[in-house]
Image (cartoon, helix red, strand yellow):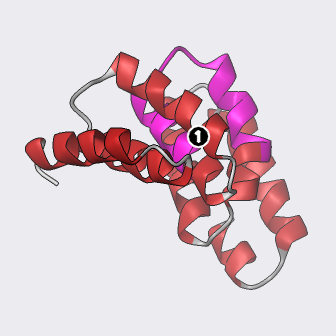
Amino acid sequence: MIADLAAGDEPAALVRLEDLLARHGRDPVMVHAAAVQLLRVNRPDVVADKIAPVIRELPPDARLDQVLGLALYRLGRFSDAETVLLRSLELDKTLPLTYLFLGCTAEKLHQPQQARRYFERASQLGL
């Protein structure tokens, strides 16, 4: 899938993604791995369009919400990103990247004090 995207063969990549989701869409580890790989090749749109519906069908998972929140952030959908990242935080308050992403999102939403608090918490957790 990723090799197809990197080579510019989006139709083949999307077919492979659909196949992967059909075979492994109930496995949160596989869904997370697919989303991360898509973000690595700068395709947050595919995460939002193809992976997000699968995430909504799975049991709540902080890491899945975290990666979806990052995709939404990268698409400029800051309010949506904030909502998903806050849901991630409700599920697991120990993920420093969630705080980092929330800090970046708060900055984009012109909430500098909130951003600072998120960045401080990310730092306290090891970032």
Question: Mark 1 falls on what kind of element?
Answer: helix
Q: Residue at x 21, y 45 (%)?
A: 122
Looking at the picture, how far across and down is residue 36, in whole percent? Answer: 51, 55
* Residue depicted at 68% across the width and 81% down the height: 6
Magenta run includes residue 56 = yes
Q: Is residue 21 magenta?
A: no
| Quadrant in which the N terminus appears | bottom right
Q: Give how far across and how far down residue 112 sits, in percent.
A: 39, 48
Q: Quadrant of the C terminus?
A: bottom left
Give residue 10's quadrant in the image.
bottom right
- Direction from residue 62 to residue 93 in the image, left or right: left
Residue, far bottom: 7
Residue 10 placement, left or right of 65: right
Q: Main secondary structure of the magenta part?
A: helix
The magenta-colored residue range is 49-70
Residue 115 appears left or right of 1: left
9 or 76: nearer the viewer = 76
The residue depicted at 84 percent of the width and 56 percent of the height is 15
From the image, tell me which residue sits under label 1: 81
- Residue drawn where x is 50% and y is 42% of the image: 32
What residue type is disc 1 on? Ala
Residue 24 on image: x %, y %: 62, 35
Q: Give the quadrant of residue 113.
A: top left
**Hey, which residue is sitting farthest right in the picture?**
11
81 shown above or below 108: above
Between 71 and 99, the one lying in front of the other is: 99
